[in-house]
Amino acid sequence: MGEAVGQSLPIAVGVLVSPMPIVAVVLMLVSARARANGVAFVLGWIVGIAAVGSAVILLVGGAAGGDDGEPAVWVGILKLVLGLGLLLLAVRQWRGRPRAGVEPEAPKWMAAIDTFTPVKAFGLAFLLGGINPKNLLLVVSGATAIVHATDARGEEFAALAVFTVVASIGIVIPVLIYFVMGARAAQLLEGVRAWMVANNAVIMCVLLLVLGTKLVGDALTILA
């Protein structure tokens, strides 16, 4: 299991520092239903990541090894596709970054967060955690790294649990800060939100570039 965790951990960190989900949870924590929506968002995020990761494990877990004990060719091909996908997203993030001095345009759904119920908060987090294209590629990449590292189903799900916990730290911390500090956390959280929005493109570009390069390198090693 140690190897599975080690292989997937860098990707989990990539999910952890994704700016937009952190911005979303911060906005919920300064809304009227802060406590309920914050908890619902965390739960939806965890379920979204766990659901996608579990689907990958159930579909391909135990089949990643070839007859000679080496990784199957399809694993290399899948990693290559995922790595190239992440590199493509990195290029799009860089090209779409706002010019110096220009306020980045926030997604339209953020304007409606003040009116969210816990059900909507859960649904948004589920979509951001497991279905959003950037996160989907990262979670599938992480689960693929897990099934590549071990054939034991129990170890695969245990490693996925660790992956999910690490990937959730970025949105859990603001919620914990709010529960500890209450209304006093508003100024601190607003500062985090503003910084994340301003630097979203650069942060994601660097992350996607590093993780995409790693996956492409792993793929070439398997296919060579």
Image: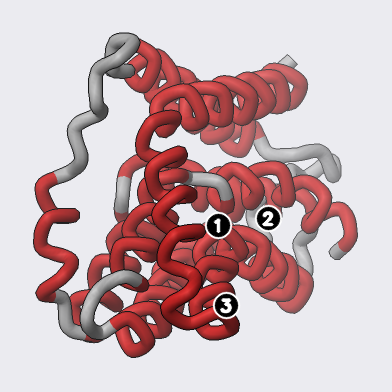
Taking the spot 48% from the left edge, 19% from the top edge, the residue there is: 87
| Towards the viewer: 92 or 136 | 92
Location of residue 118 in the rendering, given as x and y in whole percent from the top left corner:
24, 85
Residue with the mark numbered 3: 176
Quote the CA–CA distance across marks 3 and 1.
36 Å
Tag 1 near tag 2, CB within 8 Å: yes
Residue 175 lies, with reference to residue 168, above or below; the image says below
Taking the spot 18% from the left edge, 66% from the top edge, the residue there is: 113
- Which of the 4 quarters of the picture holds residue 14? top right
Residue 144 seen by the camera: no
Residue with the mark numbered 2: 147
Tag 3 near tag 1, CB within 8 Å: no
**Circle 3 crowding by C-alpha within 10 Å: few under 14, some 14–19, many from 20:** few
Disc 1 marks which amino acid?
A: Val
Quote the CA–CA distance across marks 1 and 2.
7 Å
Residue with the mark numbered 1: 60
Question: The C terminus is located in which quarter?
Answer: top right
Which one is earlier in the sequence, the residue at label 1 or at label 2?
Answer: 1
Location of residue 116 in the rendering, given as x and y in whole percent from the top left corner:
15, 76
Check disc 1 and report its element: helix, strand or loop: helix
Quote the CA–CA distance across marks 2 and 3.
32 Å
